[in-house]
Image (spheres, rainbow, N blue to C red):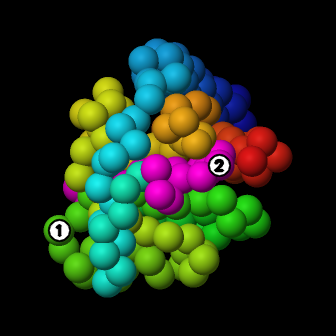
Amino acid sequence: MIEELKEYYHSEKEINDFVLSTLKEDIKLGFQNEGLILNSQTPLIEDGKGTHMMADIIKNKTLVIRFSQLNCQACIEAIKPLLKGLKTKQVVVFADYTNKHFLKEFKKGLNEDWRLFNVKLLNIPMDDLNIPYFFVLDEEMRLSHVFIPHKEVLSHVREYLEVIEQHL
């Protein structure tokens, strides 16, 4: 029994150490991106519906979900069920993909009201990381509430999404 408790303690400590170090790094990354202003003339390619300028799509505070076909697929799949629970319609997806199969699979299980755009680069530090991330974009194209979801701590993702829903 004592050995089991020791093993449990060590496994919980490892998880907590991972969460703490990850959150520290995420806070640094958030500060690097928070408040940046995107180019309002960035082209957004909507599958089968043409190209739009970012300023024509983002008219008020909107949650942006950023994914790439090169991101960890297990991470994307772990996050998708939480996204499904979002009730706000003020959500767009900026995905970087070349593979139409990726797009088809990615769309499965997402809210059909959300618009999905193919966006290569946003020219912000977060794009260099090759991981999924979320942020709020306002009508001035200013980033806020930058967040990196981690499949290992889905409770944090759920809490972030709840806060953002209240914010929008």
Q: Residue at x 68, y 66 (%)?
A: 89
Q: How far from the left and from the top, in percent, is residue 76?
A: 43, 59
Residue position marked by numbered label 1 in the rendering? 98
- Say few, some or many: other residues with alpha carbon within 10 Å of mark 2 (under 14 / 14 to 19 / 20 or more): some
In the displayed structure, does residue 8 sit left or right of residue 168? left
Whether 72 is among the magenta residues is: yes
Q: How far from the left and from the top, in percent, is residue 48?
A: 32, 83
Q: Residue at x 61, y 33 (%)?
A: 145
Quarter of the image with the N terminus is: top right
- Say few, some or many: other residues with alpha carbon within 10 Å of mark 1 (under 14 / 14 to 19 / 20 or more): few
Residue position marked by numbered label 2 in the rendering? 60
Furthest-right residue in view? 166
Which image quarter: residue 39? Answer: top left
- Span colored in magenta: 55-74
| Separation of residues labelled 2 and 1 (CA atoms) | 29 Å
In the displayed structure, does residue 93 sit left or right of residue 11? left
Q: How far from the left and from the top, in percent, is residue 68?
A: 30, 56
**Please, is residue 162 above or below residue 84 in the view?**
above
Which mark identifies residue 87? none
**Please, is residue 72 above or below residue 16 in the view?**
below
Along the viewing direction, whichever of 19 and 92 lies nearer the viewer? 92
Q: Residue at x 33, y 46 (%)?
A: 41
Along the viewing direction, whichever of 165 and 71 lies nearer the viewer? 165
Type of amino acid under label 1: Thr
> Can you see residue 28?
yes
